[in-house]
Image (cartoon, rainbow, N blue to C red):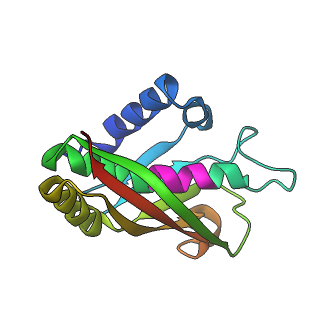
Amino acid sequence: MIPSPRTATWQLRLFGWKYVKLIFWLRPTVTEISEKHLVVKIPLNRRTRNHVHSLYLGAMTVGAELAGAGLVEYLKADIDKSVVLLFKDYQSSYYKRAEGDTHFTCLDGEKIKEAISQTAKTGKRVTIPVKVIATVPKILGTEPVAEMTLGLSLKKKD
């Protein structure tokens, strides 16, 4: 079941507080969520900006990770909770500086759902590339500042 953005934000922050302190420290917010996409916002503030007042590379990486992995976590709840996610690789292209609150959008929900189903049926590892697009809507609208491709590796827990 897909939660509301508010519930998803609290779940994400609780996960960060409990397991990955950096996620909690960055204060991400889920702004949109559905079976097809997830949008996570990382605010530009003293915690996340670099020396030229744009979003730090590490914060950009966390945002991409949360958009891709968050969608997996919500979709696997309806299919098979024993599927575990790891990242196999990460590729990124940066086009402009992210000089405002940055939104990370993953639109590969259907591809992820299919991979989870395949892993649940066969029990074998499935690795798929998932694309995440970073935008700064208040400054640049829908123009991307970066594109990241995550290699999501899914396997059924023994």
- Within the image, what quadrant is residue 60 found in? bottom right
- What's the magenta region? 61-67
Q: How many marks?
A: 0
Name the quarter where the N terminus is drawn.
top left
Please give left or right for residue 8 compared with residue 66 in the image: left
Residue 103 in sight in this render: yes
- The residue shown at (25%, 63%) is 115
The residue nearer to you, when weighing 28 against 6, is: 28
- The residue shown at (58%, 76%) is 143
Examine the rendered structure and indicate whether residue 72 appears above or below residue 12.
Answer: below
x and y, in percent, of residue 39 in the image: 42, 56
x and y, in percent, of residue 154 in the image: 32, 54
Please give left or right for residue 50 compared with residue 122 in the image: right
Residue 101 in sight in this render: no
Please give left or right for residue 60 compared with residue 5 in the image: right
Residue furthest out toward the right: 51
90 is within the stretch colored magenta: no
Examine the rendered structure and indicate whether residue 121 appears above or below residue 23.
Answer: below
Examine the rendered structure and indicate whether residue 125 appears above or below residue 157.
Answer: below
- The residue shown at (43%, 30%) is 15
x and y, in percent, of residue 17 in the image: 51, 25
Residue furthest out toward the top: 18
Name the quarter where the C terminus is drawn.
top left
The residue nearer to you, when weighing 49 against 94, is: 94
The residue nearer to you, when weighing 65 against 88, is: 88
- The residue shown at (29%, 51%) is 155
- Within the image, what quadrant is residue 26 found in? top right
| Main secondary structure along the magenta-highlighted residues | helix
